[in-house]
Image (spheres, rainbow, N blue to C red):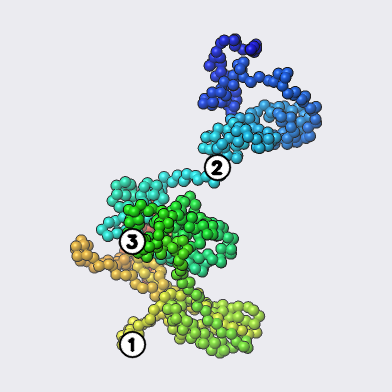
Amino acid sequence: MQCDAPRNTGWRPGARWAREDVQASIEALPYHQRPPMRELGRRSEAAAHPFRAMPPDEGGPVVPAPPAPTRVPAGHWRNPNGMIDHAPSPFRDLDPNGDERAMGAIARWNAMPAIRYPGEGPHPNKLERMERRGSNDPHAKPPGVVPFFDTARTTADVVARNCPEQGAPRDPAPLADTEPPLVTAQKVGSRVEIAAASPTALAMGLTPGMALTQARASVPDLDVRDADPAGDRAALERLALTLARRWTPTVMVADDATLLLDLTGVAHLHGGEARLGRRLCALLARHGVGARMAMADTAGAAWALAHHGPADKPVQLCPPGAHADAIAPLPVAALRLDPVARELLARLGIDRVGALAAMPRGPLVRRFGTALVRRLDQALGRLPEPLVPVPVPEPVVVAERFAEPIATPEAIAASLARLVAKLATALAGVGQGARLLELAADRVDHAVQRLRIGLARPTREPGHLLRLLARRIEEIEPGYGIDALTLHVRRADPLGPEALAPELAEESAPDLAPLVDAIANRIGAHRLWRSAAVESDVPERAVAAVPPLDPAEADAPALKADDVRRLDERAPTHPWQPRWPRPARLLRRPEQLDNVVSLWPDGAPRRFTWRGRSYAVVRADGPERIAGEWWRRPAERAGVRDYFRVEDEGGSRFWLYRRGDAERAETGDRRWFLHGWFA
């Protein structure tokens, strides 16, 4: 066999191809066409040695002559395969036949590498892709290559790492470094254990049920807070009530972390079960509630799939009739069994629901009782499991319609008396008291007039409610007549049986609620308030506006016998110190004074101007220095105020202060302000 070596190479028969020459040939190739080190066959083919594939000889198939060039229309170009494609944006508007600038741009475009994205081979054109799609060539569709990379020489591991398959599970996103680990702790017997853990704490290996001492030893900077089971239960019940009003009327609180919803006949109203699950999970996520959902034929199967199903599926849909096969591979804890039964099953080697379902019922009942078999049959659909829904409170509404329209105040008042009596009976039946009532008057011309009255505390006394409504009758414009009157209870609070002993006693505290309601409904509830003392040295923070009938602050909790605070026998200090008098009226915002004359640095002002009027001071007392509350804002760490009580020639007494101590600039800008005046 004869082999003709190329003339432009230094190869001769019997000589080895030098490694340096092969490496030089590989480095001369474009970067995207260089074969990796592990593909030695391709590396040897990259060099121009005599053993690479030769063109066909005379006995091979006849290569047809290239067709005559055709005129390329404007906006198109001829690719390296001879096909006419639409021109790219750099020379879209150029003429490729006569414009030299366009021909040069197209030539430079053709000289660019064909691969402009990660890959290792020439990009196949459309015809080659179509031919290779139905072939058995393993290079046509490399295993592990995602659809985005449709090349014949793409490295599978690189593509799988950069662009995973569609639907493949992805690694969870890394947690923020600034998020501290947070857990809640509760006392179980004599042991303090973790009740719940944040995602950061879970990533560090802290799980619910772990001892708190072990968690602190593992994570020294752990943020531990007391668990609130009652608050969590109340929040879960509020969520169940919200779902019952919006999604399905049957919602049951199954345990401390589970809600059971009966979606029979309501799934189609929300676009089907799959869409309902996605919308519900998205709604809960927007409100900061993480949830997992499962839909099955039985409540037990849905509970099992939601708690022990695949972790990467927030919404799991079990096909109809397939719930038995869906829960078969789950652990026996998915049947909501007690810990004693689970431990005994683990000793017997039964750890899956399918293995438990295959056992005969008689021995199970004799060994475990009826609870285990009942849970199993409920999950499999052999026994019913009724749901006890949360009661949805119905709004209290009373209405009265008239055969003939009414328009006189007397007729409206008589109708209101009957409505209030019905309303009081309805409120007593549900154990509530009204806090906000709305009266709707439907006129003949289909116009609706509405009046609202508020109450300081819940009540259902008919006489008091009627008096409040009767004072607003003149605001109703009957027009051509009123067809119906309706009373709506817009807000209500629980109200139990009322004790009559204080009212029957000779000396009883006066009830201010009727007076407060009468004044508030006349001038507005936002204009009626009382002042409450707040523990603060800053004057504007030492008083707060509270509703007029709010209860007083609760007494301090009783101290234990060994508490060291019992040694302090002094009476508790009131927030308003009597030895430091305060003015009867404080301005909402202190007003700056002008033309202040005072001795420097601690002298009282002798003259000042306020609102364009000049005042001469005849008596003064002070200063009273008040420092800022540094724990509120950094700007108050060095700030001080020097207050003075001054009296002018007319006998008016004012409360002035200077911002700063007049010595250090960081304490204030030394301006004077009027904060209030005395009676």
Q: Which residue is mark 3?
A: 367
Cα separation, mark 3 vs mark 2, equals 49 Å
Between 78 and 344, the residue placed more toward the observer is 344
**How far across and down, in percent of the image, does residue 549 sit?**
39, 75
Checking the image for residue 165, the label placed there is: 2
In this rendering, does residue 616 appear at all? no
The structure residue drawn at horizontal position 57% and vertical position 39%, both measured from the top left corner, is 146
Q: Nearer the viewer, residue 319 or 182?
A: 319
Q: Residue at x 65, y 84 (%)?
A: 480
Quarter residue 450 falls in: bottom right
Tell me the distance, in whole angstroms, between the alpha carbons under discs 2 and 1. 80 Å
The vertical placement of 566 against 348, above or below, is below
Q: Is residue 541 above or below residue 497?
A: above
Q: Position of residue 13 (x, y in %)?
A: 59, 10
Choose between 462 and 542: the one closer to the eye: 462
Image quadrant in which you'd find residue 622: bottom left
User: What amino acid type is highlighted by mark number 3?
Assistant: Arg
Asked whether, in this view, residue 271 is left or right of residue 127, the answer is left
Q: Nearer the viewer, mark 3 or mark 2?
A: 3
User: How many dots with numbers?
Assistant: 3
Please tell me whether mark 1 or mark 3 is closer to you in this view: 3
Question: Residue 529: x, y in percent?
Answer: 42, 72
Give the x, y percent position of residue 662: 35, 53
Please report the residue visible at 44 percent of the width from the left and 81 percent of the height from the top.
429
| Label 2 SS | loop
Residue occupying image coordinates x 50% and y 78%: 396
Q: Amino acid at mark 1?
A: Leu
As drawn, the label of residue 504 is 1
In terms of depth relative to the viewer, which is nearer, 100 or 572? Answer: 100
